[in-house]
Image (cartoon, rainbow, N blue to C red):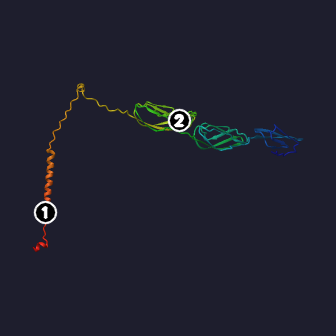
């Protein structure tokens, strides 16, 4: 900054108060690179010679240089409930006065002064986050991409449809799961199981008391794990009552001796029943034979030879 002198040559120059560090005043000129921030302040500059003095007021404000922020890694993939994250920005230029970010981070992950840290407790599809660093010199921003995946574990029942009989004790139905008990699983079922059935840490057991149609139940396991829900369907059949045949006899009939069963004696065998048909068959057979023999004799012709003719 050079002052414009329209009068006589200045013999000496003065400034009050002292300029901020890094700025130099000489012969009416202000030069240099300020090394500190400074709020708006007035500085009086005097030009002196034998003819007198003249002054001017200069206002100077030194801003913080704009921050230039960046993250060395910008893509992060975490496993829900298992992985942690801690990332801090590299800052060039001035110091940020305030920080901002959007959108909201997943549950379990926090943001403070450009640092993102924590362990996510919910799944998140790939999301781009914008981080701003602000100061009096301006604003700088950076991007990061965050993904939170479902942890690998499985939980289910070996059977999903139960058909039970009322008033009969059912075998314990225990879930099959692949995760450590250190995950502190907490089990719940909705709606409540039928009367008589018990739900305990995912196990279903008991004696159902009332029949019901096929009903779906949602079983959820939570805790340090991501909530996971699966289903089981239960039908309860009515109690089978075996039919009972009641004795209609009175006491006297019950105590009486059973009646004696008399079977008819077989009649003497009559030989005529089978002999007559046999004789009839034989007679018919003989008649047929005689008839055939007679017919053959009638068909024979006697032929005389030459010797008989000479006689």
Mark 1 crowdedness (10 Å alpha carbons): few <14, some 14-19, many ≥20: few
Residue 19 coordinates in the image, percent (x, y)? 81, 39
The residue under the point 14% across, 54% down is: 286
Examine the image and state in which quarter residue 30 appears: top right
Pick out the residue farthest to the bottom: 310
Can you say which quadrant of the picture contains the N terminus? top right
Image disc number at residue 297: 1
What residue is at 52 percent from the left and 33 percent from the top? 187
Q: Position of residue 198 (x, y in %)?
A: 47, 31
Picture quadrant where residue 29 is located: top right
- Image quadrant where residue 102 sits: top right
Instruction: Please state the horizontal and vertical placement of residue 5, each as a whole percent of the image.
Output: 84, 45
Residue tagged by mark 2?
221
Q: Nearer the viewer, mark 1 or mark 2?
A: 1
Left or right of residue 165: residue 130: right
The residue located at (83%, 42%) in the rendering is 25
Nearer to me, 271 or 27: 271
- Of residue 67 and residue 166, the one placed in the foreground of this image is 166
**Badge 1 element:** helix
Which of these two is toward me, 277 or 164?
Answer: 277
Q: Nearer the viewer, residue 4 or 237?
A: 237
Q: Element type at marker 2?
A: strand
Q: Which mark is residue 138?
A: none
Residue furthest to the left in view is 311
Farthest residue to the right: give it.
50
Say which quadrant the C terminus sits in.
bottom left
Q: Residues within 10 Å of mark 2 (few under 14, many from 20)?
A: many
* Badge 1 or badge 2: first in the primary sequence: 2
Image x and y of residue 119, in percent: 62, 37
Q: Give the alpha-carbon distance from disc 1 to disc 2, as whole Å.
A: 113 Å
């Amino acid at each position: 900054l050079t002052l414009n002198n329209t009068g006589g040559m200045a013999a000496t120059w003065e400034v009050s108060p002292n300029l901020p560090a890094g700025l130099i005043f000489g012969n009416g000129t202000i030069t240099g690179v300020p090394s500190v921030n400074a709020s708006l302040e007035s500085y009086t500059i005097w030009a002196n010679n034998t003819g007198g003095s003249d002054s001017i007021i200069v206002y100077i404000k030194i801003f913080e240089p704009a921050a230039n922020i960046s993250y060395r890694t910008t893509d992060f993939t975490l496993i829900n409930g298992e992985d942690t994250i801690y990332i801090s920005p590299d800052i060039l230029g001035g110091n940020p006065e305030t920080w901002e970010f959007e959108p909201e981070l997943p549950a379990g992950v926090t943001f403070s002064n450009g640092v993102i840290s924590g362990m996510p407790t919910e799944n998140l599809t790939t999301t781009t986050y914008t981080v701003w660093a602000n100061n009096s010199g301006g604003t700088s921003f950076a991007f990061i991409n965050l993904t939170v995946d479902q942890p690998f574990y499985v939980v289910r029942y070996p059977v999903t449809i139960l058909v039970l009989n009322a008033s009969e004790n059912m075998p314990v139905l225990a879930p099959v799961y692949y995760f450590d008990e250190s995950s502190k699983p907490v089990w719940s079922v909705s709606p409540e199981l039928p009367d008589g059935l018990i739900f305990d840490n995912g196990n279903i057991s008991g004696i159902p008391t009332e029949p019901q149609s096929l009903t779906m139940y949602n079983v959820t396991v939570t805790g340090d794990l991501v909530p996971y829900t699966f289903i089981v369907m239960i039908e309860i059949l009515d109690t089978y009552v075996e039919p009972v045949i009641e004795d209609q006899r009175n006491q006297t009939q019950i105590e009486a001796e059973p009646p004696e069963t008399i079977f008819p004696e077989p009649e003497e065998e009559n030989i005529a029943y089978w002999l007559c048909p046999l004789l009839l068959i034989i007679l018919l057979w003989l008649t047929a034979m005689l008839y055939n023999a007679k017919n053959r004799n009638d068909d024979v012709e006697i032929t005389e030879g030459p010797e008989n003719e000479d006689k």
